[in-house]
Image (cartoon, rainbow, N blue to C red):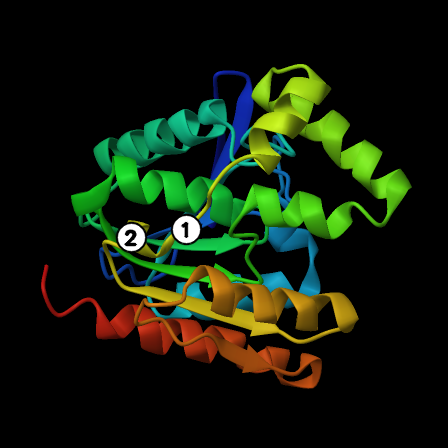
């Protein structure tokens, strides 16, 4: 069996099985385009993501992921479901109870909250092109009025708050995240377009004072992503 799809709280979830499992699991928290349905998911439909999945499976990793209510923007509901998915997978599969997390874009918002809730159950985290701060993301989008309004609607729906209340709440926050890094964290950023260069400067501001040194790669080097990820995950598996 290559994968298994199942529902929890109306949301579809998927487990990808390696041929020769090592007992280590990876939870994938996807970006805005991420989805899981009854027979497939974004990471198997996208050629580049499928290559990463296949290389991770070749190294024996059991990989699992959830639809997480679509564009959840780090909502408490999404975080709770991600934790429930972890508990289900640990009960149903033969896995070490300390997992790796691979979060892309918006998925980093869920990952940071999970890091607080599941401190001793997360082995390491890779953040790929992450959104580390809703406040800074909103501020960046303000100059693009159409996208800003669309983002506010999505945030309001995800967090179940009125748009104007939510906007004021997020923009008035004082955000620092370095104190949250209670496990090994690696940031990987693919430099594609002006926006990604602005995002790379933002990382330096948000993680100032931490020991994290982001890895920046050019788009033509994206095929190296899985190799970078596997090396990082391997480095944090000596202690069971």
Seen from the viewer's position, the closer of residues 201 and 88 is 201
Q: Is residue 195 above or below residue 218?
A: above
Q: Which mark is residue 179?
A: 2
Where the C terminus falls, by quadrant? bottom left
Q: Residues within 10 Å of mark 1 (few under 14, many from 20)?
A: few
- Residue 23 is left or right of residue 17, and the answer is left
Query: Marks 1/2: CA distance?
Result: 7 Å
Q: Quadrant of residue 168?
A: top right
Q: Is residue 194 above or below residue 135?
A: below
Q: Quadrant of residue 112?
A: top left
Question: Disc 1 vs disc 2: Cβ atoms closer than 8 Å?
Answer: yes
Q: Is residue 51 above or below residue 43?
A: below
**Residue 143, position as x, y percentages in the image:** 84, 50
- Residue 59 is left or right of residue 148, and the answer is left
Residue located 62% across and 78% down the image: 222
- Residue 130 is left or right of residue 40, and the answer is left
Residue located 57% across and 52% down the image: 131
**Residue 219, position as x, y percentages in the image:** 69, 79
Q: Which mark is residue 52?
A: none
- Residue 224 is left or right of residue 192, and the answer is left
Helix, strand or loop status at disc 2: helix
Q: Is residue 161 above or below residue 34?
A: above
Seen from the viewer's position, the closer of residues 87 and 130 is 130
**Residue 92, position as x, y percentages in the image:** 26, 33
Q: Residues within 10 Å of mark 2 (few under 14, many from 20)?
A: few
Residue located 34% across and 78% down the image: 231
Residue 186 seen in this snapshot: yes
Helix, strand or loop status at disc 1: loop
Q: Which mark is residue 176?
A: 1
Residue 97 seen in this snapshot: no
Residue located 33% across and 68% down the image: 209
């Amino acid at each position: 069996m290559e994968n298994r799809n199942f529902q929890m709280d109306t949301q579809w979830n998927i487990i990808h099985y390696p041929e020769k499992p090592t007992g280590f699991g990876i939870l994938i928290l996807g970006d805005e385009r991420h989805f899981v349905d009854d027979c497939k998911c974004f990471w198997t439909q996208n050629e580049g993501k499928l290559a990463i999945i296949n290389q991770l499976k070749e190294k024996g990793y059991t990989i699992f992921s959830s639809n997480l209510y679509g564009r959840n923007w780090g909502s408490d509901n999404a975080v709770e479901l991600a934790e429930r998915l972890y508990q289900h997978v640990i009960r149903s599969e033969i896995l070490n109870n300390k997992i790796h997390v691979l979060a892309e874009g918006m998925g980093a918002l869920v990952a940071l909250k999970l890091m607080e809730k599941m401190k001793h159950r997360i082995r390491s985290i890779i953040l790929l092109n992450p959104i580390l701060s809703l406040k800074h993301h909103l501020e960046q989008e303000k100059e693009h009025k159409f996208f800003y309004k669309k983002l506010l609607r999505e945030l309001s729906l995800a967090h179940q708050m009125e748009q104007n209340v939510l906007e004021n709440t997020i923009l008035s926050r004082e955000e620092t995240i370095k104190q949250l890094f209670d496990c090994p964290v690696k940031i990987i950023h693919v430099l594609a377009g002006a926006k990604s260069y602005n995002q790379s400067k933002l990382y330096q501001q948000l993680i100032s004072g931490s020991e994290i040194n982001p890895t920046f790669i050019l788009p033509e080097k994206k095929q190296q992503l899985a190799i970078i990820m596997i090396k990082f995950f391997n480095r944090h598996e000596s202690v069971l």
